[in-house]
Amino acid sequence: MELDESQQSDPSIMGLDESQQSDPLVVIRNGKEIILQAFNWESHKHDWWINLDTKVPDIAKSGFTTAWLPPVCQSLAPEGYLPQNLYSLNSSYGSEDLLKALLNKMKQYKVRAMADIVINHRVGTTQGHGGMYNRYDGIPMSWDEHAITSCTGGRGNKSTGDNFNGVPNIDHTQSFVRKDLIDWMRWLRSSVGFQDFRFDFAKGYASKYVKEYIEGAKPIFAVGEYWDTCNYKGSNLDYNQDSHRQRIINWIDGAGQLSTAFDFTTKAILQEAVKGEFWRLRDSKGKPPGVLGWWPSRAVTFIDNHDTGSTQAHWPFPSRHVMEGYAYILTHPGIPSVFYDHFYEWDNSMHDQIVKLIAIRRNQGIHSRSSIRILEAQPNLYAATIDEKVSMKIGDGSWCPAEKEWTLATTGHRYAVWQK
């Protein structure tokens, strides 16, 4: 399943001029990414590009390789997820000039900028077929109703994925639509200054189109939001989430293995495990139970995002256990992502604890395909050794590695990490 398991990180890419780099697998193979989600649901109220500009030095120093920014285009909703004119970079987060200044600063500090690619749906400017706003007269990419799926009131084909209700959904089967979208993504890469892509609502259209978009626009790194419902018995999360992680893996395969995906399986299991059910963190084969247990180089692990946490709080991680969550994802294989709120808004000590965990990960050379031995998975204790270089425990059960050569590297509320 994993094409690149046997390849160790290639040191030759570290000094690569990333504006020239066009193979989307180079960074995935290297496996050293650490992502910051650099916004929350309220960010549009706070001169966001100016705010982030002041934080770039700290983001770089903390060890993040890429920062995911909110959608940058003009949108009917201030958060950016109801885009209309994709070529207008004046948004509620700030002006085009402020955005470009921020991207420039990120480049100076060698933090890549990740664009939020919202291309499942688009709000029209003009009423068309059926009286719906499904025409785009007067703005760039001035599509007509044939660009919109028949299931959401357009004259295009049926959707190749789930519908995002209440707004025209883009018909990706149309070659003129795909050409326009690739041109736009190339513009984000070459003219605006983004390097990485995050595909919003990736369930909304077939993943083969994501493959085409990545091949056409050549982001350095890509991640898809394939957010699917887990397996439950009543309100209890099933122990076995294999079918859930398999659906995410099928999406990655459909995208030509060129994109990673958010590991919603790990989030679901980890936030139940920390409540005293750590047995959940070892699957029936002795491996981690999320996408990171099956395809770690494509699994972007996270604790919360602007939907699950923030003021939306659709599915929040238990707040008293957030650091246990980070102790898990920042020591484990996969590609960890840290949420803005936890890093900058909760309290200073959390920022510093996360920085320590990132430093241990980097200093010990832990990467997305690092080996893992799970040593304990009891109700009140989970312990594992990663690459035989880092050991960790979470939960209130007591544990420490047996051999003398281990030294305590960091500790906090219900977690501890050792290194050799």
Image (cartoon, grey):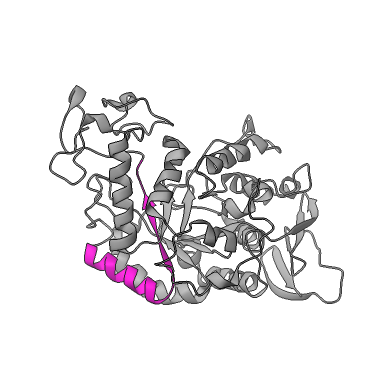
From the top left corner, tell me how far across and down residue 202 is, in percent: 45, 41
47 to the left or right of 24: left
**Residue 109 in view here:** yes
Identify which residue, 410 or 221, lies in the foreground: 221
From the top left corner, tell me how far across and down residue 399 is, in percent: 81, 63
From the top left corner, tell me how far across and down residue 150 is, in percent: 31, 24
> Which image quarter: residue 239?
top right
- Residue 235 vs 272, above or below: the answer is above
The residue drawn where x is 21% and y is 43% is 141
68 to the left or right of 390: left
Q: Residue furthest left?
A: 138
The residue drawn where x is 48% and y is 56% is 24
286 to the left or right of 330: right
The residue drawn where x is 38% and y is 71% is 106
From the top left corner, tell me how far across and down residue 218 is, in percent: 41, 55
The residue drawn where x is 53% and y is 61% is 26
Magenta-tinted stretch? 95-119
Quadrant for the N terminus, please. Answer: top right
Instruction: Tell me, yes or no, whether the highlighted magenta stretch contains residue 167.
Output: no
- Residue 235 vs 292, above or below: the answer is above
